[in-house]
Image: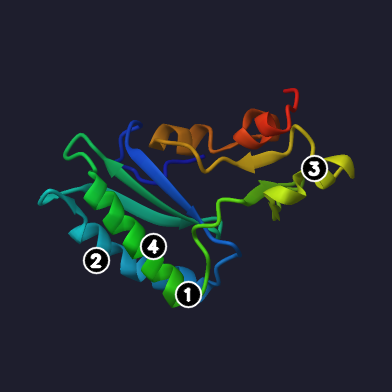
């Protein structure tokens, strides 16, 4: 993946909030207009954070903090969750459903499914151990660029179903 935040260090902390549906172009514009104000005010213990944000693939709200300048604290992380909750309410979308998975098919198209459907989808061939999954448990910017998408077998969900790599 090409660099998303040009001035962000590979170790910057990343949080991914996945919408339960594709965002409309107007909703993406709404978020992108609101992001600069939030990022400019986002602070930890009074210190401004070197923060970045964007929407990717019409589905993912991504926030990053380069902690070389200031570390994100519990209060600052709470502030970001509060802001994402506000976006969720404004757009009538769920950014906090961790049981909703987004994958990519062999044609490059995104599709989503609920964790509860995984076994049936594996059994009927809709998923395989090599299906690319967006792994929103990643922790830093380097992982966002290089390991966000990985085969199902290499994710927490693949481990849950004991899939061979």
Which residue occupies the extreme right position in the image?
A: 124
Query: On residue 135, which mark appears?
Result: none
Q: In the image, residue 4 lies at what x, y percent?
A: 41, 46
> In this rendering, which labeled residue sits more in front, label 4 or label 2?
4
Earlier residue among tags 3 and 4:
4
What residue is rendered at 66% in x and 29% in y? 159
Separation of residues labelled 3 and 2 (CA atoms) = 43 Å
Q: In the image, residue 103 lies at what x, y percent?
A: 67, 47
In screen coordinates, is 85 left or right of 80?
right
| Mark 1 residue crowding within 10 angstroms, few (<14) / some (14–19) / many (20+) | some
Q: Is residue 95 above or below residue 142?
A: below
Q: Secondary structure at mark 2?
A: helix
The residue indicated by pointer 3 is: 119
In screen coordinates, is 36 left or right of 110?
left
The residue indicated by pointer 2 is: 37
Q: In the image, residue 64 lies at what x, y percent?
A: 34, 46
Q: Is residue 68 above or below residue 111?
A: above
What residue is rendered at 73% in x and 27% in y? 162
Earlier residue among tags 3 and 1:
1
Separation of residues labelled 4 and 2 (CA atoms) = 13 Å
For this rendering, which residue is in front, 33 or 87?
A: 87
The residue indicated by pointer 4 is: 84
Separation of residues labelled 1 and 4 (CA atoms) = 10 Å
In screen coordinates, is 66 left or right of 151?
left
Earlier residue among tags 1 and 2:
2
Separation of residues labelled 3 and 4 (CA atoms) = 31 Å
Separation of residues labelled 3 and 1 (CA atoms) = 32 Å
The residue indicated by pointer 1 is: 91
| Mark 2 residue crowding within 10 angstroms, few (<14) / some (14–19) / many (20+) | few
């Amino acid at each position: 993946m090409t660099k998303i935040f040009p001035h962000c260090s590979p170790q910057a902390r990343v949080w991914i909030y996945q919408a339960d549906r594709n965002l409309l172009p107007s909703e993406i514009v709404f978020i992108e207009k609101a992001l600069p104000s939030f990022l400019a005010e986002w602070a930890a213990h009074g210190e401004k954070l070197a923060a970045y944000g964007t929407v990717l693939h019409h589905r993912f709200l991504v926030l990053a903090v380069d902690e070389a300048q200031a570390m994100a604290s519990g209060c600052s992380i709470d502030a970001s969750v509060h802001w994402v909750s506000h976006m969720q309410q404004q757009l009538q979308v769920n950014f906090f459903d961790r049981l909703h998975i987004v994958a990519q098919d062999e044609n490059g198209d995104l599709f989503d499914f609920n964790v509860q459907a995984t076994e049936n989808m594996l059994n009927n061939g809709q998923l395989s151990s090599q299906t690319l999954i967006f792994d929103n448990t990643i922790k830093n910017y380097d992982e966002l660029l290089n390991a966000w998408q990985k085969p199902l077998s290499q994710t927490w969900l693949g481990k849950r179903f004991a899939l061979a790599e």
